[in-house]
Image (tube, rainbow, N blue to C red):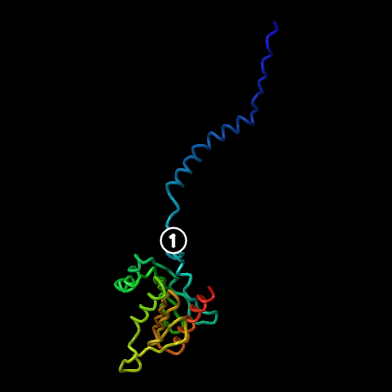
Amino acid sequence: MTEPAQPSRRRTSPGEWLAAALLLLALPAIVLGIYLIGRAGPGPVPPETGFAGELNLAALLPLPAAGSPFRITSQPKQWPAERMHEKIDGEDIVYLKHGCVGLAAMTLTNPADANTLDLFLYQMAGPAAAERILAEQAPREDAPDPADRPEYVDVGDKAYLSYGCCYVRAGSFYLKIIAGSQAPGSVREVLELARRFAQRLERE
C-alpha cells in the first residue's frame, strides 16, 4: 500500500520573519495609544470658539470696517448663561431672569486717542425677552433733562442712543455698545457697528 503524499511545507522567508517581528514590537505602542486617546476624550471647547451645544455667539459680534480707526484689543469671547458672572458679575442676574442663553463680548480701541468701545451681545430666550430687557434698561422718555432721554435710531427691530452708547434689539439678540467717549467720531463708529450687526442678522 502506498502511503499518502505529505503536503509540502513552504519555507518562511527572512523578510516575512522581519515583518512579523516589527509588528510584535509595535503592538504595545498601538494598544497604549488607543487607551490614551479613549481616556482623554474630545477635550473642552474654548470660549473663543463657542460652547458645546450652543450658537457661536462671538462670531456674530460686529467687526470694524476696513477704514475704521478702531482695532480689536480684546478678542471676541463668549460665556454660557451659567458662566456670565465671569464677565458681568452681579449683572448676570438681571439677564438670567429674562431667560438669557449666553453672552459674547469684545473691546475695540482707537489708538489715536485711546477711546474704547465695549461690545456686549446677549442671546435671549426669544424676541419678547430681548424686547423686555431693552425696555427695562432704557432711560425714561420723559426725563426732565432732554440729554437723559433715549434717542431712537433706525437700526434692527428697535434701538436707541444714550450718552454716545447704543442699545439694539434684533430678533432674539440684545446688543450693547458702550463708548468711552461721546466724541462725534466715536458715535459714528457706534452707529456703524450697530448697523453692521443688524444687517448681518437680516442676511442670515
Depth order, front residue of 117/82: 82
Q: Quick check: 40 above or below 134?
A: above
Which quadrant would residue 13 be assigned to in this image? top right
Label 1 crowd bin: few (<14), some (14–19), many (20+), radius 10 Å:
few
Question: Which secondary structure lies at badge 1?
Answer: loop
**Residue occupied by mark 1:** 53
Where residue 157 appears, as percent x and y from the top left, is 45, 81
Where residue 68 appears, as percent x and y from the top left, is 51, 82
Where residue 179 appears, as percent x and y from the top left, is 40, 83
Task: Please state the total of marks drawn on the protein image.
Answer: 1
Depth order, front residue of 204/92: 204
Which quadrant would residue 87 be assigned to in this image? bottom left
Which quadrant would residue 162 be assigned to in this image? bottom left
Depth order, front residue of 164/204: 204
Q: Quick check: 67 above or below 148?
A: above
Q: Is residue 182 left or right of residue 26?
A: left
Q: Is residue 33 left or right of residue 124?
A: right
Residue sitting farthest toward the right: 2
Quarter of the image where the N terminus is located: top right
Residue sitting farthest toward the front: 128
Where residue 38 appears, as percent x and y from the top left, is 45, 46
Q: Amino acid at mark 1?
A: Gly
Residue sitting farthest toward the top: 1
Q: Residue at x 42, y 57 (%)?
A: 44
